[in-house]
Structures are given as structure tokens and as C-alpha cells.
Amino acid sequence: MFGALPAALTYYWRMKMPETARYTALVAKNIKKATQDMSKVLQVDIEVEERAEDPKLNYGLFSKEFLRRHGLHLLGTTSTWFLLDIAFYSQNLFQKDIFSAIGWIPKAATMNAIHEVFKIAKAQTLIALCSTVPGYWFTVAFIDIIGRFAIQLMGFFFMTVFMFAIAFPYNHWILPDNRIGFVIMYSLTFFFANFGPNATTFIVPAEIFPARLRSTCHGISAATGKAGAIVGAFGFLYAAQPQDKTKTDAGYPPGIGVKNSLIMLGVINFVGMLFTFLVPEPKGKSLEELSGEAEVDK
């Protein structure tokens, strides 16, 4: 019952918020209402400025004009989000399996349930505090300095580098003396995921598309990303099974093993880096400039 309270409060306060001025002016075509809303929010008097509508900018999602202007952009945002979530969710959901495989935490069969939960929680908390959380704060600090494109490209690049660095010499890292090195480099893949595409793939689709299609394109990109999460969650679960069928978990067929699965994730990160080149750099530009809505007839 109490769980419904945050949702109810969110709904109440959302209903009190005015629609964004861009939507009201550019989509609802009510410039007067948009001006009034902005005056209320900014607490200043703003004069209404009527402007003629450019019919060339009134194109739909399935139009040739959208394909010409933003087709590659949408391909870039959907593909990078899809590829990121395959790799990111695979790494996140199966940390315990990877850490058990290298011997950083004991096998589940050697612990009781409470001890297992404690060990896994401690390992995942350490990864989060040392890599995941700092990665987000680095993005916050540098996103308007070096830009979304550079952060995403750099993130995919270093995710690829560190994934290959732990995958190819995998047999070296599982030795007892080398496990800490494995954990450090594995943590760096999370750091550059968050100081990289795990932040920018959410931000960029909200900036580069026209106001009337912005939410739709962002939703398409996000839905494609969640499809990647499904692929990553189920795919890694099966792929990481040992090739020897006598060593697989109960009910699972033989897979390609942890080493080959990590190599595959490295390849996915590399492909994500390539698709990043389809995404424009929004840094320092207004939403109207990015979407082409600020174009002036010559």
C-alpha cells in the first residue's frame, strides 16, 4: 500500500507542471500558451512573438525527409544503446558467475545461502564504489567539456580494450596470484561504461531529434536498448556455460565458455564504437539547431 505513495505524489506534481514550452510552441502550435508558461516558470514578462510556420519542417517519423535528416542518427542511437546493453547487462547480471569462475568468491556449493549473499553483495558493492559510481560522476563533470560523442567513443574504446585484456589471457587471470588484476581491469570496464555510453546513450536521443518526434525517437532507442539487455541476460547465461557438457550447470546445454563469452562482449563493444560515428555531437548547440528546427529560409 505504501509503495503506491511515491507514484501518487509523482503523478500529482507532474499534473501541476506545465508542458515544456518547446512542445507547446512547436508541436501544439500554441505560442501564446508557451510564452505564458515560460513567464510563469522564469517569473519574468515575455512578449509573444508570432512566427510563420515552415512547412518543410512539418515532416513525420516515416517520411523521406526524416530519413534524410535523422535516419542515420536514429540508427546510431538505437544500435549503440542495443550493443551497450548486451555487454553491460551481461557483465552486471553475471558478476557472481565470473567472480566464482576466477575464484574471487567461493563456489555456491561451498557456502550457505546467507554467506553467499554476503560475499556476492560485498564484491558487487566494491565494484560499484570503485568503478560504476565514479564513472557517472566523471560523466557529470566532463560531459559539457569534452562532449557526448567523445565520451561515448572513448567509453566503447576502453571497454573493448579492457575486455580483450581480460579475455584473451583469461587462463592467466584465473590463477590465484592474478585474480586482483582481473578484478581491477574488470572494474575498469564498468568505469568506462558509465564514463561512456551507459550515460550518453540515454542523453543524446533526447537532444538531437525534432520536438514533435523527440520522445518517440528516444522511446525507440530505449526500447531497442532493452532488447539488447534481454539478449545479454539470456545470451550470456547460455554462452558462458563450459564447453564440456559434464561441467555445465543443471539444465543448460554446453556453451562457449567464459573466455569466449568475454571475447564476444569485447567485439560487441568494438562494434558499438563504430556505430557511435553515426551520432552527432550535441555539445554547445541548442535543441533547435540540432534538430534543424532553427533553419531559416534563404
Image (cartoon, grey):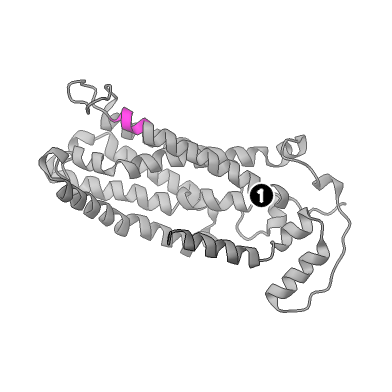
**Position of 44 relative to 37 (above/below):** below
User: x%, y% of residue 118?
Assistant: 19, 53
Q: Position of residue 149 (x, y in %)?
A: 54, 50
Task: Read off the residue under disc 1.
Answer: 214
246 lies left or right of 73:
left
- Picture residue at 74% right of the left edge, 74% below the top: 39
Q: Badge 1, how many Cα within 10 Å: few under 14, some, many 20+? A: some
User: Horizontal and vertical percent for residue 121?
Assistant: 24, 53
Is 116 within the magenta? no
Q: Is residue 279 above or below residue 39?
A: above
What amino acid is found at the position of numbered circle 1 in the picture? Arg
Residue at 81 percent across and 46 percent down: it is: 58
- The residue drawn where x is 73% and y is 37% is 68
Instruction: Let me know if residue 46 appears in the view.
Output: yes
Residue range highlighted in magenta = 235-240
Give whichever of 170, 28 is nearer the camera. Answer: 28
* Percent position of residue 280, x then y: 61, 47
Predominant SS along the magenta part: helix
